[in-house]
Image (cartoon, grey):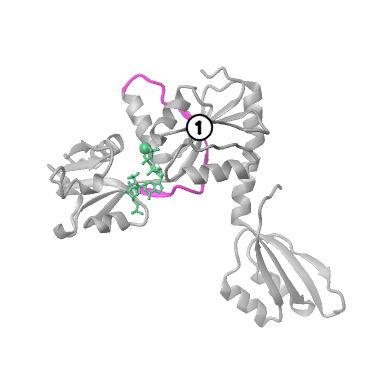
Amino acid sequence: MSNNKRLRIAIQKSGRLSKDCQNLLKQLGVKLNLREQRLIAHATNMPIDVLRVRDDDIPGLVMDGVCDLGIVGENVLEEVQAERRNSSASFAVKKLAKLDFGYCRLALAWPQELGAQDKQWFNGKRIATTYPEILSQYLERENIDASVVMLTGSVEVAPRAGLADAICDLVSTGATLEANGLMQGDTILESNACLIQNQELADDDKLALIDKLMPRLRGVKQAKESKYIMMHAPKAKLDDICALLPGTGQPTLLALAGSDDYVALHMVSSETLFWETMESLKALGANSILVMPIEKMME
Ligand SMILES: Nc1ncnc2c1ncn2[C@@H]1O[C@H](COP(=O)(O)OP(=O)(O)OP(=O)(O)O)[C@@H](O)[C@H]1O
Ligand SMILES: O=P(O)(O)OC[C@H]1O[C@H](OP(=O)(O)OP(=O)(O)O)[C@H](O)[C@@H]1O
Ligand SMILES: [Mg+2]
């Protein structure tokens, strides 16, 4: 257990999740002095320390209580959980939130020249992956008798190198598969980054700090999805205009200096305005239509 009085958060040191994790902490109001080479960064305005490590180590650090919180891909979390379930190490964590970055999927792929294949094709084949536990569970579920070849990197070259017949790897744009002449098959897992907490965390001050950060996290997410919409709207068409606006929120109507026919209409919407809706609003006589991003929100 961490007996440090400061809340310890583990994030990826350098890789796909690093920038997004740093941005998130900044949006939550955590001021960090991140010097590139430092393993631990201390927040200057809250009792928080950020540990920067390899993503593979993050679930274990949180499960063992070395860190109180961690941000990691669900793919890595599931793999480590399955690994630890087989040994007698602790594997439970509390998933506090699924985050809106780090999206990727774990998918099967094989050489393009073999053409489309069904699941039965994998029987007797060798599949290279960095996620042996997740893959084995899938194979068992689907009743496929294939062998798993564990590689920690460059999985895409395995078929060409003769190390395996197929692969099971992370895909986001599909560019890496294409560059290696591979064809994508079933998705085994869809993954986002997530925020996890040590399950046995009992320190009241740390729990209170997490309780303070969680509404901020929700606020950041909500703000990202929301827009502030403003326009000048003809009074005579207000009902038609409101019917076109997304969401159920009531707009604010303000008098427009020098005009008896128009009002200024403002509203916070949970979604953006599509061009088509803006054109319809304009056709009803609205003008000066603005759709603006929102930085922070608290309801
Ligand atoms: N296109 C993508 N490919 C791989 N991972 C992605 C992608 N998009 C998002 N991710 C997520 O980012 C996580 C980290 O990916 P990255 O490639 O930086 O890991 P890594 O090479 O294992 O880094 P580390 O050195 O920390 O072990 C992945 O586990 C996954 O959750
Ligand atoms: O579908 P794509 O958009 O091409 O992304 C998929 C690739 O990205 C990841 O590797 P990454 O680039 O993070 O490098 P790494 O394997 O060295 O970690 C992953 O292992 C794939 O190789
Ligand atoms: Mg890693």
Q: Residue 260 in the image: x percent, y percent? A: 86, 79
Q: Judge by depth and name the residue closer to the eye, 196 or 47.
A: 47
Q: How many marks?
A: 1
- Give me the residue at 60% from left, 54% from top: 224
Direction from residue 59 to residue 257 in the image, left or right: right
Residue 288 position by quadrant: bottom right
Q: Judge by depth and name the residue closer to the eye, 185 or 48.
A: 48
Residue 24 position by quadrant: top right
Q: Residue 12 in the image: x percent, y percent? A: 45, 37
Q: List the residue tagged with mark 1.
A: 38
- Compared to 252, does 232 lie above or below? below
Q: Residues within 10 Å of mark 1 (few under 14, many from 20)?
A: few
Q: Residue 9 in the image: x percent, y percent? A: 54, 31
Tell me which segment is drawn in magenta.
Answer: 87-105
Q: Residue 214 in the image: x percent, y percent? A: 62, 38
- Element under disc 1: loop
- The three-letter amino acid code for the residue at tag 1 is Arg
Q: Is mark 1 within 8 Å of ligand 1?
A: no
Q: Judge by depth and name the residue closer to the eye, 146 or 212.
A: 212
